[in-house]
Amino acid sequence: MSRDFGSDFLWGAATAAYQIEGATTEGGRGASIWDTFSATPGKVLDGHTGAVAADHYHRMPADVALMRDLGLAAYRFSVAWPRIQPTGSGPALAAGLDFYSRLVDELLGAGIEPVLTLYHWDLPQALEDAGGWPARDTALRFGEYAALVVDALGDRVLRWTTLNEPWCSAFLGYASGVHAPGRTEPAGALAAAHHLNLAHGLAGRAVRDGLGDRGLLSLTLNLHVVRPASQAPGDLDAARRIDAVANRIFLEPVLDGTYPADLLADTAAVTDWSFVHDGDLEVTHTGLDVLGVNYYSSQEVRAARPGEPRSMDDGHGASTSSPWVGSPDVEFLPRSGPLTAMGWNIDPSGMTELLVGLHHRYPELPLMITENGAAFDDEVSPDGRVHDPRRIAYVHDHVAAVGDAMEAGADVRGYLLWSLMDNFEWAYGYHRRFGIIRIDYDTLERTWKDSAYWYRALISTGRLPSPTDPGVVPD
Ligand code: IFM
């Protein structure tokens, strides 16, 4: 018997503005840090940028029709802040709001629930020029921006996510510098993390003020499943440190109204945390109606062995500056087993472990998988189809792992696959394909991969098909 997820379970797919929209100079849109970063030689593989991406800005109605054909019940997208406020402050631009308003109307017309993310990494460049996320003012501006979007779309959108993966914004953006804006300032990265938490709180207030009990407030985190290489005290401490600076640095201010004491101790040599002002933790402590969980792979860490070469296979790109602020002696062990095109290991048990762990720590908290999926080097076959059995197997095994967590008590409300379509994969440009729909970047043609037919079969029944079940494929 295949597993039945029930009729209330929300099946969908996810994307993000800069990764698919293109049209970066249209509708009055201002520049974002990713426009600047990707235009800087050496920052993105082969100099790729989001200028055209999947051209979703111009093809939106057809893309929503495609989602309807897939049978999606929900679609997670992000709003590009610089389309709404080109310089990150001031009144909303009508053209920007209009694009997302039309998207929401198309989705609702197709029977698809919009799941809106306010920030998926495209900070207006003008705000970066004024200090970026290490500057407190950026959080205040984000609260204002959130209120503008809530005001325009809150009559139709009920599911609001403030931030996507603030760990990446803070630590890849400001510590290792492999993401925009590419700064390498460990103390600034910790300040950025706090200001992102504050921004979440301010935007959360805007959502609650605008929608009251109708709205569902969420935050999406890329929580790290970090296992110690052994039970030796040093290795256990390595895992604890990474858990603090990757996971608890966001979970606790939002769900408990505190910062972890061990995190403050681990990072005391880097900063005194004086950027946390009186009253801030009341703002960050919003509680959540649902926590968004992004999970792709797991990691193994240990205390660095003096005199031995140090491995830093953390899956977040090479840099001479570590994203692991306050943890200079932690080593990330090389990954084993079949890897995805990102070099990430495939570990569905990590999904179950993560969800069950969250359930034990926060028993009342509903969870939603807001991203899970895999990049592989897909090819178009001579038959014109894209056969991607490894992606199907990956999604199959991870959805099963979600089911295992639910059986163990975790309150998981839905699964949003990353990604609906191939897109701009940040520092890797278009060289990594996560979509279940293939994008031909020369013609911008959309082609269903085998995984799209398979996922449609899953959605239409709410039951997990065998990974070898092709679904209903047209001749
Ligand atoms: O493409 C990204 C997405 O923007 C954020 N989460 C991880 C995905 C795959 O790397």
Image: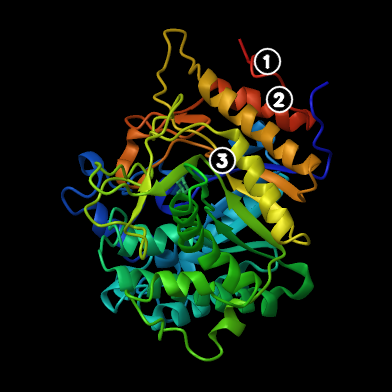
Q: CA separation, marks 2 and 1? A: 9 Å
Instruction: Answer above or below: position of 35 versus 393.
Output: below
Label 3 CA crowd tier, 10 Å (few <14, some 14–19, many 20+): many
Describe residue 458's horizontal placement relative to residue 379 as left or right.
Answer: right
Residue bearing the label numbered 3:
372
Cβ of disc 2 within 8 Å of ligand 1?
no
Decide which of 121, 331 is in the foreground and name it: 331
Identity of the amino acid at label 3? Asn
Identify the disc placed on residue 457: 2
Residue bearing the label numbered 1:
469
Identity of the amino acid at label 1? Asp
Identity of the amino acid at label 2? Ala
Decide which of 273, 367 is in the foreground and name it: 273
Residue at the (79%, 23%) spot, across then down: 2
Picture coordinates of residue 257 (x, y %)?
62, 78
Label 2 CA crowd tier, 10 Å (few <14, some 14–19, many 20+): many
Q: CA separation, marks 1 and 3? A: 20 Å
Describe residue 337's horizontal placement relative to residue 410 as left or right.
Answer: left
- Of circles 2 and 1, which is in front? 1
Label 1 CA crowd tier, 10 Å (few <14, some 14–19, many 20+): some
Q: CA separation, marks 2 and 3? A: 18 Å
Picture coordinates of residue 305 (x, y %)?
31, 47
Q: Are the residues flagged by discs 2 and 1 in contact, CB closer than 8 Å?
A: yes
- Of circles 2 and 3, which is in front? 3
N-terminal of the pair, mark 2 or mark 3, is: 3
Cβ of disc 3 within 8 Å of ligand 1?
no
- Of circles 1 and 3, which is in front? 3
Residue at the (39%, 75%) spot, across then down: 191
